[in-house]
Structure formats: structure tokens, C-alpha cells
Image (cartoon, rainbow, N blue to C red):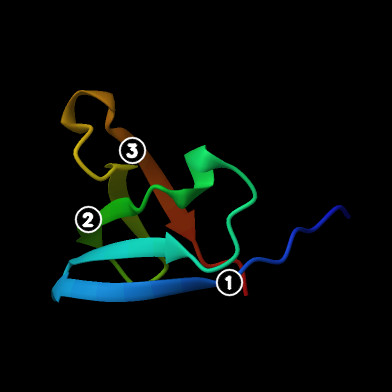
Amino acid sequence: KNYKIDSAKIRWVNDCECILTKLNPKSNQEKRPIQIKILSTNEKSYTFEYSLVGDLKNKRKGKIIKIK
């Protein structure tokens, strides 16, 4: 498998929202922090939306599923 390892600082805004900032950005795009908001959770997954901070019109959604 092809994995990438990265490090970031996470600042929690509230129980469901955080700001992720890469510690070692390789480009100007990677320097911009990402805002992540958890929308819903259950035992094995959660859905979230994310965007670059300040870029509200380009929000994306994702889902994380626990596999073990």
C-alpha cells in the first residue's frame, strides 16, 4: 500500500468542529488550514464536512468507517 505520513496541529473550536493546520506544508496550498465539522456519528462511523478556512462555497463531505 502507498501511505503518506503527515503531521498537523489540531485546534478544537467546539465538541464537533476543529481547525487542522499542517506542520510541514510543502506548498502554499498546504499552508492553508482546513476546517472540519462532524455532522453525525454512530458506533462504527461518522460523517463530516470540510473546507479550507474561509472558503465556505467549496465545502465537501466525507464519511469515516471503522473497519476493525
Question: What amino acid type is highlighted by mark number 2?
Answer: Lys
The residue drawn where x is 27% and y is 75% is 11
Query: Where residue 56 sits: x, y (%)?
Result: 17, 32
Instruction: Single out the residue that lies furthest toward the top.
Output: 57
User: What number is the disc on residue 7?
Assistant: 1
Label 1 crowd (10 A; few <14 / some 14-19 / many >=20):
few
SS assignment at label 3: strand
> For mark 2, what is the residue?
37
- Depicted 47 relative to depicted 44: above or below: above
> What is the CA distance from the residue labelled 3 to the residue labelled 1?
22 Å
For mark 1, give the secondary structure.
Answer: loop
Q: Nearer the viewer, mark 1 or mark 2?
A: 1
Q: CA distance from mark 1 to mark 2?
A: 19 Å
Badge 3 is on which residue?
61
Residue at the image point whose x is 46% and y is 50% from the top = 31
> In this view of the protein, which residue sits in the foreground, 40 or 1?
1
The residue type indicated by label 3 comes to Lys
Residue 62: percent from left, percent from top: 40, 43
Instruction: Tell me residue 1's x, y (percent).
Output: 88, 55
- What is the quadrant of the C terminus in the image? bottom right
Between disc 3 and disc 2, whose residue precedes? 2
For residue 26, side relative to residue 1 (left or right) = left
Circle 3 residues within 10 Å: few <14, some 14–19, many ≥20: few
Tell which residue pokes out farthest to the front in this image.
28
Residues tagged 3 and 2 counted as in contact (Cβ below 8 A): no
Type of the residue with mark 1:
Ser
